[in-house]
Amino acid sequence: MSEAAPLARPVFGLRILERRLPQLMRRVEPTGIWVLLDRKVEPVLGRALERALAATDLPHRVIRFTASEKNKSLAQLEKLAGRFLRAGADRGGLILGVGGGITTDVAGFLAATLMRGCAWGAVPTTLLGMADAAIGGKTAVNLPEGKNLLGAFHQPRFVLADVASLRTLPDREWGCGLGEVLKSGMIASPALLRRIESTPPRAIRRAGAEALALAKAAAGVKVKIVAADPLEGGERKLLNLGHTFGHALETAAGPRKLAHGEAVGLGLLCAARMAVDTGRARPVYAAQVLALLQRCGLPSRYPGKLPSPAELTRLIGRDKKKAGKTVDVILPIRPGRCEILPGQQPRELAAVIAATLG
């Protein structure tokens, strides 16, 4: 079911939720709407969401969810499945995830598995969600062994990004989103990198035209790649830039010390260092990546003592993208150009982390 679903191209705008959600629902024609709503978002979007749902003239129920890495779990998924079933969810209905990347990941995986699959849609409310997490159909929960190890490809029927929801986004969440925007520029958009370099940081961190432009540009990079390779058989692997290093660091530190976007930022530094060390990139580009990271307000050092090489090797060896005992790693070559370097040993990648952040 998920493999056959078409790629949803995000709808972006400012204060568009009440107008566009009913329009999108008329295209899908579900029997009802079951909403997974991040509690943190309710004070910002709650009233507009309720008016939008009422305007659909469809039965709807709202299930509230405390979004956290701890709650992005199989145990929480089971509880949510029970709540949705008791609320009357059926296979003809649509699950709507309203929140950041954790919420849309969980909503999507719930939709992929509940009653063997039903439709879903995403209303991302963070820059990270709008630029990356809600797009492309990757859905998952975490396991004790690592992030996103239990999941499915299940395309949302639509992605509706109302930039007005960013107006109360904390500074740390802005930074996390900008980390994914930076990644998209490094993969395929030198113009996006130039825009980050030329825009005052205060102007970026507003729920207005600049945030809208950055989110749309980053999402455009991802949409183009996913459209060509929906199940990550080739080119889509480029979107993992920074993530093999980053996921290991994020798991080791925990979400309080190192959020996802921050970990991806450190992963970008490690990837740039490896590209230079292997002769694929010039040192000046690694310096540019560091400067961009700092401009986005992201950390360039690991918080606390770096894990041992053995621990980093173990964590990288659990990467969900591994093949046998090796991992493909993505290296940034120059602005807007990356390469896939296959068959890397986890211990070698752990050594890159130590050399970059130690």
Image (spheres, helix red, strand yellow):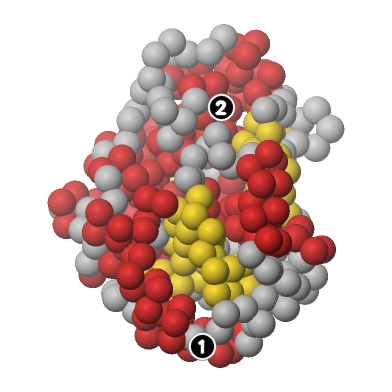
> Which quadrant of the rendered structure holds the N terminus?
bottom right
Q: CA distance from mark 1 to mark 2?
A: 43 Å
Dots 1 and 2: beta carbons under 8 Å? no
Vertical order, 215 against 266 (above or below):
below
Q: From the image, tell me which residue sits under label 1.
A: 57
Q: Residue at x 75, y 73 (%)?
A: 91
* Image coords of residue 276 (percent x, y): 48, 32
Foreground of the two, 44 or 203: 44
Disc assigned to residue 243? none
Residue type pointed to by label 1: Asp
Residue 331's image quarter? top right
Q: Secondary structure at mark 2?
A: helix
* Image coords of residue 8 (percent x, y): 58, 74
Q: Residue at x 63, y 14 (%)?
A: 311
Q: Nearer the viewer, mark 1 or mark 2?
A: 1
Q: From the image, tell me which residue sits under label 2.
A: 251
Vertical order, 135 against 333 (above or below):
below
* Image coords of residue 58 (percent x, y): 56, 84
Q: Residue at x 67, y 28 (%)?
A: 144
Give the mark nearest the N terminus, 1 or 2.
1
Q: Residue at x 69, y 54 (%)?
A: 81
Whether residue 109 is visible: no
Residue type pointed to by label 2: Thr
Q: Secondary structure at mark 1?
A: loop
* Image coords of residue 138 (percent x, y): 64, 56
Whether residue 298 is visible: yes
